[in-house]
Amino acid sequence: MKATYSVKILFVIMLCLGYCLNFNRVTAQNTSASAIIPIPASINTEKGEFTLTSKTKIVVSDNNLATIETAKYLADQAKILCGLNLSIVTTSKSVKNSIVLNTKASGKKESYHLKVGKKNIVISGADQSGLFYGVQTLLQMISSAAENSPKIVIACADINDEPSFTWRGMHLDVSRHFFPVEFVKKMIDMLAMYKINTFHWHLTDDQGWRIEIKKYPKLTEIGGWRDKTMIGHYTENDQKFDSTRYGGFYTQEQIKDVVTYAQKRYITVVPEIEMPGHAVAALSAYPQFSCTGGSFKTYTKWGVSDDVYCAGKEETFSFLEDILDEVVALFPGQYIHIGGDECPKTRWKACPACQKRIKDEGLKNELELQSYFVKRIEKFIVSKGKKLIGWDEILEGGLPERAAVMSWRGYEGGVEAAHTGHDVVMTPGGYCYFDHYQSQDQTNEPLAFGGFLPLEKVYSFSPVPPELSAEEAKHILGAQANVWTEYIPTEKQAEYMIFPRICAMSEILWSPKAKQDYTQFLSRLNGNLKRLQKAGINYRPLKTN
Ligand code: TNX
């Protein structure tokens, strides 16, 4: 009797133990694979777990400077996330209880292999950016493990990951409202976390010129400031303004600092210098490059101005080429964005110099004059070893031979460009405009441009339209979110508009379509929001629309 009783007790104990062990395993699993945004291309969860301790070493196995930088980045971030001070060693020997970093993986650019074993974690990038993304994935696992228990337990797993698109971007308009370097860096940090690799910096517009140009100091002295700013919505019958002088700009030193900061996070900064339209701030400083000669004041309201650069005067082109000369020297990336959007033809129609240009060049009309303008600038940019990208209006009147198109008025511009073999970045307003409302009930939301772009709609975005052939689809480099800031005056509000929509955008651009699942994304997002909160991000809480 007694013996059977003990056996029974033993059996119950074993059951409990088994349950506990299994439970632990499930918890550990939850702390890894199910926490990552964007979801990796392939994850195999395996038995066992790795426990991160203060004794865990980061091993740089290839003695490469970039790998060492990434090791330092990992150590710094791990300290923030879980308080552990991980030391870095450089050795090709195997080290127990370590996170090994190398660039030995095979695969396409930016891809990586992450293996969590019981004794070691090995992150192999196909290149340095791949290694960096592997580290980002591990950091997400550490972050989520740290939330669940003081012990950092990561379930064993084998992850193979690569991006779907090469252009994974976010744009920030710093003209309508100015954002200081510290904020730009904070955003770059967050973008890196979500494997976004392009930061499109909208540096000039009617309402403010934000980049120091040494040859034309008045661009920032005068064009960097406006007398007042519109309050309320542009469409109100009775437009209202404050009475505060507003402005700011980045020195070239600050620009270089941001570019280097971004480079260390594998983010390319694409500068945008608007032309021929959206140029009132520049013209307020140098009115001689307009059709009428001015005078102008840096714009204080939103919308589109009739005053644009004069396409007839030779001096306009010298002026812009001088500016671009300085811009090209500051930004090592391939692309220079020249805007090209929303350029009314009113002034050109009435301008003798523009009309003469149309006649002399045998152009049909002002649309072709715009095309002449962009093509001329494109030649210059190409002569500097760079590529031109512009908003889809640059298609009108004929696209420069090698230019890439940013399709914002829907998919159409991008489709047309891809049909003719041009590269395209998709940014259709309905899916990518983060200045749109996040709720249908606008009363509880901060004033915004308009529209309705909830998280779920961002997640439903597909950058490649079905009408493209497989060959044409290769021209869709990717997509980006655009953050226009007419109605975004503060950093807090910018964060509210960007997060968590950028998390959805990152998954659309990185993860394979077959892995995209909104409900599952939401469950992974919950943990991510805690990390955003820790990083001091004023994200929009998940609530119904
Ligand atoms: C259109 S998108 C613009 C911007 C505005 C934005 C507001 C584009 C190329 N031009 O100047 O800020 O709409 O959503």
Image (spheres, rainbow, N blue to C red):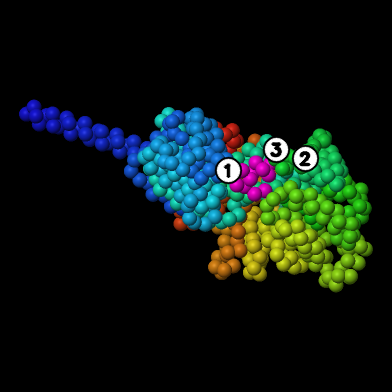
Give the CA distance from mark 2 to mark 3. 10 Å
Q: What mark, if any, has residue 395 been given in the picture?
A: none
Left or right: 466 in relation to 199: left
Secondary structure of the residue carrying numbered label 1: helix
Q: Residue at x 50, y 41 (%)?
A: 60
Question: Do the numbered discs 1 and 2 sit on residues whose CB atoms are within 8 Å?
Answer: no
Secondary structure of the residue carrying numbered label 2: loop
Left or right: 161 in relation to 357: left
Residue 254 drawn at (x, y percent): 73, 39
Q: Quadrant of the N terminus?
A: top left
Check residue 478 for magenta coloring.
Answer: no
First in sequence, mark 2 or 3: give its number. 3
Secondary structure of the residue carrying numbered label 3: helix
Q: Which residues are magenta?
A: 258-270
Q: Residue at x 30, y 36 (%)?
A: 21
Residue 187 drawn at (x, y percent): 63, 41
Q: Residue at x 63, y 66 (%)?
A: 418
Which residue in the protein does label 2 denote? 251
Q: What mark, if any, has residue 65 been given in the picture?
A: 1
Disc 3 residue type?
Val
Disc 2 residue type?
Thr
Q: Is residue 535 visible?
A: yes
Which residue in the protein does label 3 denote? 181
